[in-house]
């Protein structure tokens, strides 16, 4: 999987990018998309990631690249505070128009099947 990072308080963006096997530009993009990724900045402006943030980045990478989640899917899977939400804990929300549209589509497909038979 990822390379092992040394045990320290903060990691520079290059170290994190190497461990996660992504480019530094990808990490900066993820920071703009995910509120739970807010690295500290040194006096010189260097991004400094905590161990917890590195773990979250590895989780994001796994969800995006291996589980094939979208950015929105990852946002639903990891809370804004960085807590992983189990899929079983998520209750899907459907509006009446969603259900109505789905039923109309199923009905249309069933009619097509009946005509074929």
Image (cartoon, rainbow, N blue to C red):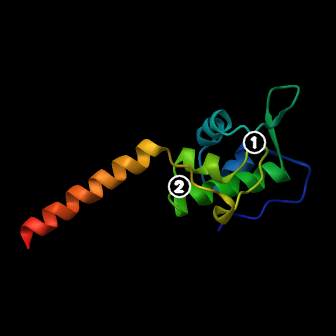
- In the picture provided, is 46 more to the left or to the right than 31? right
Q: Residue at x 14, y 62 (%)?
A: 112
Q: Residue at x 79, y 44 (%)?
A: 81
Label 1 close to label 2 by CB (< 8 Å): no
Image mark count? 2
Q: Residue at x 56, y 49 (%)?
A: 93
Q: Quadrant of residue 63?
A: bottom right
Sequence order check, earlier mark of 1 and 2:
1
Tell me the distance, in whole angstroms, between the alpha carbons under discs 1 and 2: 17 Å
Give the residue furthest to the right: 9
Residue 74 percent location from the top left of the image: 61, 50
Q: Residue at x 74, y 53 (%)?
A: 56
Give the residue furthest to the bottom: 117
Per the image, the residue denoted by label 2 is 69
Per the image, the residue denoted by label 1 is 36
Residue 91 percent location from the top left of the image: 62, 56
In the image, residue 38 above or below residue 86: above
In the image, residue 65 above or below residue 94: below
């Amino acid at each position: 999987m990822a390379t092992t990072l040394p045990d320290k308080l903060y990691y520079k963006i290059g170290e994190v990018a190497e461990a996660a096997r992504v480019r530094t530009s990808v990490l900066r993009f993820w920071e703009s998309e995910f509120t739970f990724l807010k690295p500290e900045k040194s006096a010189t402006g260097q991004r400094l990631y905590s161990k917890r943030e590195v773990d979250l980045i590895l989780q994001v990478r796994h969800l995006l690249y291996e589980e094939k989640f979208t950015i929105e899917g990852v946002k639903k899977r990891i809370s804004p505070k960085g807590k992983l939400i189990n899929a079983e804990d998520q209750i899907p929300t459907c509006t009446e128009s969603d259900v109505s549209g789905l039923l109309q589509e199923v009905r249309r497909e069933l009619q097509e099947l009946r005509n074929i038979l």
